[in-house]
Amino acid sequence: MLSHLLILAQAAGPAADAAAHGEAASGITKITQEFGLSWPFLLAQILNFSVVAFLLWRFAFKPVLSMLDERQQKIAAGLKYAEEMKAKLDAVQQESVASSRRAQLEATRIIDEARKSAKEFLDKQTQEGAAKAGEILVKAQQAIELEKKKMLAEARSEIARLVVAITERVLAKEMSDAERSRYNESAARELTNV
């Protein structure tokens, strides 16, 4: 601001020297009279303009410029933050994909182990069932064999009793207990040979 005043003062200085010389002064005074310029008023207006310009610079432009700088810094910080968040998001997404893959592999492994365990359990149960069924069949066959022997023994004794009864009728006499027992044994032996 002061530099403008100095420039004007320097411009006014040679004009004053020219006025002292005569001819140049008449040209400047002529111009100042035609345009209605008055040096004191011109200097006062320049001084007023400089004061207003300084006040505007100090209280209007400077705060606006500092606010714009601050705003620009906030925008730059916001963009930097957005880039950082984008990088973090990418990292989280990659980690999520990797975690998902690990979980999928773990789930596949668990499913395979479950299938293997189920197959082993099924095989074991099948073998146990077959063994139990075999045991039941053996026991059933033994029971059938015992029942068969029991039935044959009962049938033999019944047949022997019938033979004795028929023999008593045929011979028309009664037998003693010893004879009856001997005929029963003899009939049983004969039936076992058949």
Image: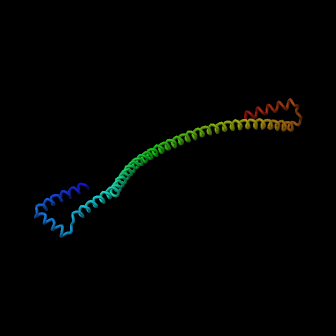
Please state the horizontal and vertical placement of residue 51, each as a whole percent of the image.
Answer: 30, 58
Residue at the spot x=18%, y=56% of the render?
10
Res 117 → quadrant: top right
186, 102: nearer the viewer: 102
Please state the horizontal and vertical placement of residue 6, each as a whole percent of the image.
Answer: 21, 55
In the rendered image, the quadrant that contains the C terminus is top right
Left or right side of 140 for 118:
left
Please state the horizontal and vertical placement of residue 120, each as a whole percent of the image.
Answer: 56, 39
Residue at the spot x=48%, y=45% of the render?
104
Please state the horizontal and vertical placement of residue 14, each as a whole percent of the image.
Answer: 15, 58
Residue at the spot x=39%, y=48% of the render?
84
In the rendered image, the quadrant that contains the N terminus is bottom left
Left or right side of 93 for 142:
right
**Residue most toward the bottom?**
34
Res 60 → quadrant: bottom left
126, 100: nearer the viewer: 100
Residue at the spot x=52%, y=40% of the render?
113
Q: As displayed, is residue 144 above or below residue 15?
A: above
103, 130: nearer the viewer: 103
Res 129 → quadrant: top right
158, 93: nearer the viewer: 93
